[in-house]
Structure formats: structure tokens, C-alpha cells
Amino acid sequence: MGGKCPHRHVKKRRYSHKTARRTQFLLKGADMVYDALKKPDEERKPLPLDEDLPGMGQYYCLHCDRYFANVSVRDEHFKTKRHRKKVKEMLGPAPHTQLDADLASGMGMPDNGPKLS
Ligand SMILES: [Zn+2]
């Protein structure tokens, strides 16, 4: 006669909040980071203090577009696989650019050698 459903206590397993929120921290596109890395130093302003960010926004990994609470956390991050992979990506072939497209279609930077007469 009525009573509790016997399966009631079985909780549905959910993702942890952090995992669920991870999409909020999704990284910028590789090409955006690449652009930032290409900028000359004078265009890289000193990091503005931002109370909303970990470590006031002073410990930033440009490659991964992430902020860290302090320098040791950031240094730890620099040693991680994820970061190294990112750095490698940045050092490798550029994300697709218009120049690539031109070169691929034989339109960019002609190098025909010395002119023959
Ligand atoms: Zn990083």
C-alpha cells in the first residue's frame, strides 16, 4: 500500500560541478592565442590587476589563456603536459591563416630565383 519507492534512494550520478562548469573556462581558439603570442612585447601590456581573477590576474599563462593564484601554481602549470602540448602547438605550424591558403595555392611569396634572360 503505497510506501516509498524502493529505488528512491538511488541517486543519479551527476558530473561534479567543476566538470559541469568546465565549458565556461574553455580556451580561446588556438589562432587567437597564436595572434597574442606574435604580438611584439610593447603590445603586451602589464597585466592589469583584476580582483575577479585568481592572483589578481597577475599570473597568466598566455598559451593556455589561464590565470593562476600565485607564481608557484603557475610554474607548476608550466610543467604540465597540457601546457607543454599547448606550447608545442604554438611553436608548430601556425593555425590556418590566409597566408597558408595563398601559399598552398601557389600565390604567396613568389621565389623564382634569378631572372634568366
Ligand atoms: Zn599554459
Image (cartoon, rainbow, N blue to C red):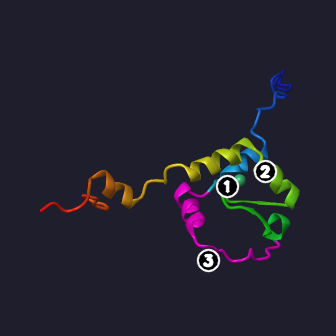
26 in relation to 8, above or below: below
Q: CA distance from mark 1 to mark 2?
A: 10 Å
36 in relation to 80, above or below: below
In the visual, does 88 lie left or right of 117?
right
Q: Amino acid at mark 2?
A: His
Count the marks: 3
Q: Quadrant of the N terminus?
A: top right
Q: CA distance from mark 1 to mark 3?
A: 19 Å
The residue range painted magenta reads 28-51
Image quadrant of residue 101? Answer: bottom left
Nearest to the observer: residue 30 or residue 37: 37
Q: Amino acid at mark 1?
A: Cys
Instruction: Report the residue that reaches farthest toward the left.
Output: 117
Give the label on residue 64, or none.
1
Indicate the secondary structure of the residue bearing disc 2.
Answer: helix
Nearest to the observer: residue 34 or residue 113: 113
Mark 1 beta carbon near ligand 1 (under 8 Å): yes
Indicate the secondary structure of the residue bearing disc 1.
Answer: loop
Q: Amino acid at mark 3?
A: Glu
102 in relation to 81, above or below: below
Read off the residue under disc 2.
77
Q: Position of residue 19 (x, y in %)?
A: 74, 44
Give the label on residue 43, or none.
3
